[in-house]
Amino acid sequence: MSDVFSADGWLNRVVTASNDFIWTYILVAVLIGCALWFTFRSRGVQFRMVGEMFRLLGDSTGRHGGPKQISSFQAFAVSVATRVGTGNLAGVATAIAIGGPGAVFWMWVIALLGSASAFVESTLAQLFKQRGKHSFIGGPAYYILKGLKQPWLAALFAILITVTFGLSYNSIQSNTICSAMNVAFGLNPIVAGIVLTALSLVVIFGGIHRIARVSSVIVPIMAIGYLILALFVIFRHIDLIPQVFTLIFKDAFGISQIAGGGIAATLMNGIKRGLFSNEAGEGSAPNVAATASTSHPVKQGLIQALGVFTDTLVVCSCTAFIILFSGVDTQAGPGGIALTQAALEAEVGRFGTIFIAAAILLFAYSSIIGNYYYGAANIHFLTRKRWVLTVYRLLSGGVMVLFGAMASLDLVWSLGDLCMALLTACNLYAIVRLSKYAFRLLDDYRAQKKEGKNPVFRRETMPELDLDCWE
């Protein structure tokens, strides 16, 4: 492997230094502050309307458009496909290895608060969506353009999300898959990367409808299988649950961590890995939320808030419990997916290593194709030239997947964190400015529910806005 791609290479040192500065001094305070404001202003929508979130998953009333429209459940499945991936298996392990068990607590905090941010951004994406050729299109670039009237900022966001998801994040997914295959079967990472590239390009050139169909099948299967195994491990050690929770809370606020400065590493890694996993406020899920055909923007906002809970509070917690129950030394040996494999092997034997390799293949593969769509949707916003999209497809599903197979674990995660910080800062600025519309929509939704109606939104409700849909 080239020194440039190694953990000690100059590229990793430059990326890590820039990344640490942005996270330490800028983004954390802004991210938490926005989440607290959205929670307060929406009167705790993520807590008060959990039952409505589950009900809406099966809601088919009020759909509009042709037969190729994306359903609410399919939009939910595609967004969960990108959320439930390496962040849940490798990201959690990395957070615990670097920040200690207390990092899990901060992952929970960012999920509970951040789901309000997810609600706001996805509701706005629905409000400002536009009609595409076969399905609706939208996302932060569209609500920045139509709501804030700032074309330059909309273009900047479109570029940032294309680089972050379609390129940087896909290298992380590839790196994790290839590492897991190497640990489980001794497969050469380059060979695994070539195979993964071929599989990714087949689906990527099929478009969002094929992505939606593949994700709606893969996501339930991979999630149920992993949860069953995790529950087996949890019930096997059910007497240790109080001790594990005590360990997590003590490590999150421990005097020794504060005195030694370790509390910063615990908090930072918990928030970073939590945001990477659930994407709340990052501006990614709104791109898929906008494609759903539904009768009211708030419906998709609630469904995407549920996706944050599903990702972090359920799947990430399962991984954390497996690692902490196993008793493996989290500070020794390789981190990332290898730590999760070692923990599960300690619980169920060799089958655990193989299962994680298979699970991460499904998790990360679905994330790769979902990540591609986020970039493609924003390429479409920037330009309609087909050759640009073709080049992007080859870079996303080809070049960056191979790069991930060759690069070090530290390099791909540092690059991903840096891109994530810039993208999130841009989106948070926009949704804070436009959040008043999301809160008005929430009030309208609640008022219609109190009257016993199936909430329906029409654009004359907000005549001051330039809306293309919602006749």
Image: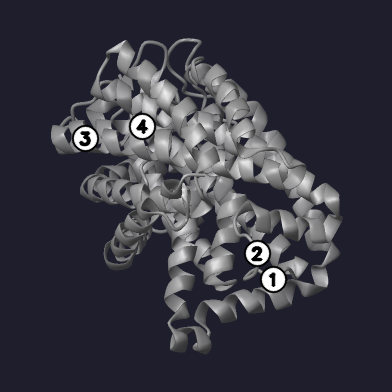
Q: Is residue 27 visible?
A: no
Question: From this viewpoint, is residue 204 visible?
Answer: yes
> How far separated are the C-alphas under marks 4 and 2?
46 Å
Residue under label 2, please give it. Answer: 333
Locate residue 395, reporting x and y percent.
Answer: 41, 26
Where residue 371 appears, as percent x and y from the top left, is 46, 33
Earlier sequence position, callout 4 versus callout 2: 4
Crowding near pointer 1: few (<14 within 10 Å), some, many (20+)? Answer: few
Q: Going 35% across and 46% down the picture, which residue do you hit? A: 120
- C-alpha span from label 1 to label 4: 46 Å
The residue that label 3 is drawn on is: 154
Choose mark 4 or mark 2, whichever is in front.
2
Pick whichever of labels 2 and 3 is earlier in the sequence. Answer: 3
- Residue type at numbered disc 3: Ala
- Relative side of 313 to 125, left or right: right
Give residue 458's position: percent from left, percent from top: 30, 26
Contact, mark 2 vs mark 1 (Cβ under 8 Å): yes
Q: Residues within 10 Å of mark 3 (few under 14, many from 20)?
A: many
Q: Are marks 2 and 3 in contact (CB under 8 Å)?
A: no
